[in-house]
Image: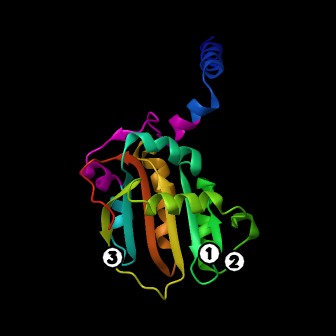
Amino acid sequence: MPKFSLFLTLTIIISFSSCETAKRTYLGIGKTEVAYRPAIEVIKYYEPFLTEHTHKTKLYVISNYEIANTAMKDFGFPRIFIKNRHTGVVYELNCFEDIKANIDDINNNVIDEYITLENHQEFDNLTAFINNKFNSKLLVYSGNEDATKKWDVYIAYATFLGKKLRKMTLPVTTIKDINEVVILDLSIDENALTIE
């Protein structure tokens, strides 16, 4: 009887929950909301991306609540783009479970066509959004730029996505020959620096 009881309970729970709920639970994703967050909280969340690296790292937050919808519509979250500075080719890493394998391929110069970005519009929207001082605010600038390096990494992310997904994303910092990592977080900080 206990096995049947457990089976029945699990069946009921599964029937009333969606795939979205299961995904959120598995990845530790919190409530999806754009929120005002203190700069120190956002910086602490991204600390693994900011430490132990010599490449340039920039961390941005959005400047106000109204433009959050623009960000969600124009390029979405979470997104990871990797741009080859020498060829201009942009790659998208969109399967978080496979990021480590993708990074290994990139580091071994085995870049398969399946990660090549065919439509640059969302990438272009992201970079334009970041470069518009009315949309985003710079929180952190660290490291050194080296224009001879091959890769620029762009991450559109949010603190509410949780630590498990952040951990899955972290291997992007191990790409060999990184010039810079640019992170846009879907948090708002009214006191962030204005981009000059």
Q: Is residue 105 left or right of residue 192?
A: right
Identify the residue shown where x is 64% and y is 82%. 87
Relative to 22, residue 143 above or below: below
Q: Is residue 195 left or right of residue 33?
A: left
Q: Amino acid at mark 3?
A: Gly
Identify the residue shown where x is 46% and y is 86%. 147
Task: Decide: few, some or many residues near mark 3? Use Cα within 10 Å; few <14, some 14-19, many ≥20.
Answer: some
Q: Is residue 158 left or right of residue 38?
A: right
Q: Please identify the quarter of the rendering in which residue 12 is found.
A: top right
Q: Please identify the quarter of the rendering in which residue 183 is found.
A: bottom left
Task: Decide: few, some or many residues near mark 1? Use Cα within 10 Å; few <14, some 14-19, many ≥20.
Answer: some
- Snapshot colouring: rainbow
Q: Which residues are magenta?
A: 23-45
**Contact? badges 2 and 1 (CB < 8 Å):** yes
x, y (%) of residue 122? 61, 57
Q: Secondary structure at mark 1?
A: helix
Relative to 53, residue 184 above or below: above
Q: Quadrant where the C terminus lies?
A: bottom left
Q: Is residue 1 left or right of residue 40?
A: right
Which residue carries the number 3 mark?
Answer: 143
Identify the residue shown where x is 58% and y is 50%. 74
96 in the magenta segment: no
Q: Please identify the quarter of the rendering in which residue 140 is found.
A: bottom left
Q: Amino acid at mark 1?
A: Ile
Distance from disc 3 to disc 2, alpha carbons, whole Å, reads: 28 Å
Distance from disc 3 to disc 1, alpha carbons, whole Å, reads: 22 Å
- Name the disc covering residue 110, or none: 2
Which residue carries the number 1 mark?
Answer: 106
- The answer to which of 25 and 183 lies nearer the viewer is 183
Callout in the foreground (3, 2): 3
Distance from disc 2 to disc 1, alpha carbons, whole Å, reads: 6 Å
Callout in the foreground (3, 1): 3
